[in-house]
Amino acid sequence: MASTDQTHLTFAEAAARCGCHEATIRRRQREGALPGTRRRPGNRRGVLEIPISDLVACGLLPSQTVLAASPGAVDAGADAPTLEPLGRHALQDPPAVASLAARLGVVEAALAQLLARVELLTSLAAAKDVA
């Protein structure tokens, strides 16, 4: 069953996206490398979901593939996701630094996807003008 949103993946989805075995994902979760793992909202069976940002932060998923692998994740008319600000003390906390690195990876991936869309739209507009 697919996960409930585009920011979290089930263990099986994460393994497929990362190109590794599901046991690798489970081991990394037990080791604490995936701190944002949660139970799927409204699911009584206890299916766990992992934030894509955690997969990027622990190195299982390259940041460039985060949004490119989920078409439509960034809609032109959609509101930008809000990120809560972190204080200066967060930079002295390794989990907070990892979280910031993951968030930066997601933002970089979103920017790359938007730039690709701009390039595509520009080329389509140029082709339309020629025709």
Image (cartoon, grey):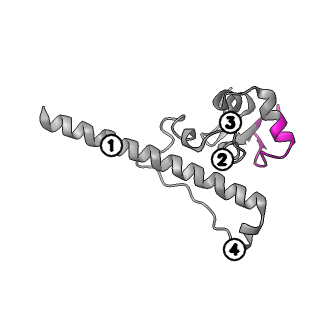
Residue 66 locus on image (x, y percent): 57, 41
Q: Which residues are magenta?
A: 27-48
Quarter that holds the C terminus = top left
Quarter of the rendering containing residue 88: bottom right
For label 3, the residue is 9
Residue 38 locus on image (x, y percent): 77, 44
> Quick check: marks 1 and 3 in contact, CB under 8 Å?
no
Q: Earlier in the sequence, mark 1 or mark 3?
A: 3
Q: Residue at x 75, y 48 (%)?
A: 36
Residue 51 locus on image (x, y percent): 69, 44
Determine the CA span between mark 2 and mark 4.
21 Å
Residue 9 locus on image (x, y percent): 68, 36
Residue type at mark 2 is Ser
Element type at mark 2: helix
* Above or below, 121 relative to 91: above
For label 1, the residue is 119
* Above or below, 59 relative to 14: below
Q: Earlier in the sequence, mark 4 or mark 1?
A: 4
> Quick check: marks 3 and 4 in contact, CB under 8 Å?
no
Residue 45 visible within the image:
yes
Residue type at mark 4 is Arg
Q: What number is the disc on residue 53?
A: 2
Determine the CA span between mark 3 and mark 4.
31 Å
Q: Is residue 45 left or right of residue 13?
A: right
Residue 38 highlighted magenta (yes or no):
yes
Looking at the picture, tell me which residue is in the foreground, 59 or 82: 59
Q: Is residue 93 left or right of residue 53?
A: right
In this view, the mark in front (2 or 3): 2
